[in-house]
Image: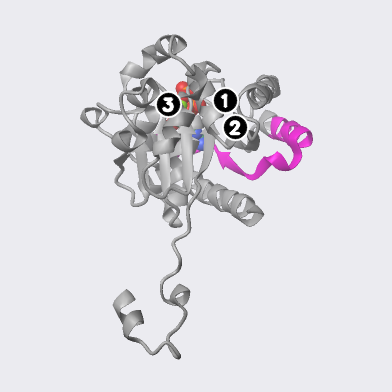
Amino acid sequence: MSGLIDQADPAVAPAPSVVAPMPSVVTPRIFAIANQKGGVGKTTTAINLATALAAVERKVLVIDLDPQGNASTGLGIEKNRRAIGSYQVLIGAATLTEATIPTAIPGLDIVPSSIDLSGAELELFDLERREFRLREAFAHLPGDYQYVLIDCPPALGLLTLNAMVAADAVVVPLQCEFLALEGLSQLTRTIERVRKAFNPKLELQGIVLTMFDSRNNLSALVANDVRNFFGDKVYRTMIPRNVRVSEAPSHGKPVLLYDLRCPGSQAYIHLAGEMLRRVEHAA
Ligand SMILES: Nc1ncnc2c1ncn2[C@@H]1O[C@H](COP(=O)(O)OP(=O)(O)OP(=O)(O)O)[C@@H](O)[C@H]1O
Ligand SMILES: [Mg+2]
């Protein structure tokens, strides 16, 4: 390509930027997918949002920061491919480049988690700059990722703290059930504290209502309350309760690959579209 440009008559040659776009430096948007409550759809959202973003040609990295390793399992990463992962990155035994492996989905890579991570909270406690371990690892981020989604464990401990200190914003999956708002206020207070103490740019990116059941009045009431309180922060797309979503992980696949047409897949595609409009149009 450059040879052709060199040989062309400068008077008629197109500007180089027309022939080959200038490589732009990509700054990834880093989102922590967090909620201290267990089983609300964090991992399902991380996996399927990542897949839907990769499907529209964004380059995406998932970091599995949960010792349960559900994001690694759900993206089909066998146990023998998890020897180097988020634990090694946090303790400084590996760089993010060394810990990143491809998934079967083009454009989607993962830093897997292994069972070692279950001891990490205690080990990290004695390490210097314990809240900044992941953030500092991003200095060696491989590739040209546009989105990094960090799947957090169901607790507000040092692992989630590392995710929030490294992130630009927090995406909160919220199950529409009794007391959902109470848990949410604890989470927003934590985000506020992290912003003040460690990461002034941290924002609440958005709230995703998950496992929404249109036949259940409580689901609608809670969704309404959350929208009244958090306004535009709540994504319009709601993820419906859908059995295909819960079947997919046992096949090591995101639901988008398992059954593209099911309501759960369609909802995650809509969610990704809404996120892209929010994030990229605002830029
Ligand atoms: N939209 C949905 N419809 C049906 N089942 C769902 C849906 N979303 C998630 N699930 C199922 O609910 C369970 C919890 O979801 P998930 O693992 O994503 O939650 P989590 O918040 O990551 O949990 P943990 O706190 O343990 O990490 C899983 O079995 C998952 O397959
Ligand atoms: Mg999970």
Gap in angstroms between the C-alphas marked 2 and 3? 15 Å
Query: Which numbered circle lies on residue 172?
Result: 2
Query: Which numbered circle lies on residue 35?
Result: 1
Q: Quadrant of ligand 2?
A: top left
Gap in angstroms between the C-alphas marked 2 and 1? 6 Å
**Of 194 and 251, which appears nearest the observer?**
194
Gap in angstroms between the C-alphas marked 1 and 3? 13 Å
Quarter location, residue 35:
top right
Q: Which residue is painted at 51% across and 20% down in the image?
A: 131
Q: Which residue is painted at 64% across and 21% down in the image?
A: 197
Q: Is mark 1 within 8 Å of ligand 1?
A: yes
The residue singled out by tag 3 in the image is 65
Q: Is mark 3 within 8 Å of ligand 2?
A: no
Q: Where does the image place residue 1, in percent across and percent down from the top left?
A: 32, 75
Q: Where does the image place residue 13, in percent across and percent down from the top left?
A: 42, 86
Q: Residues within 10 Å of mark 2 (few under 14, many from 20)?
A: many
Q: Which residue is painted at 33% across and 48% down in the image?
A: 105
Q: Is residue 251 visible?
A: no
Q: Is residue 239 visible?
A: yes
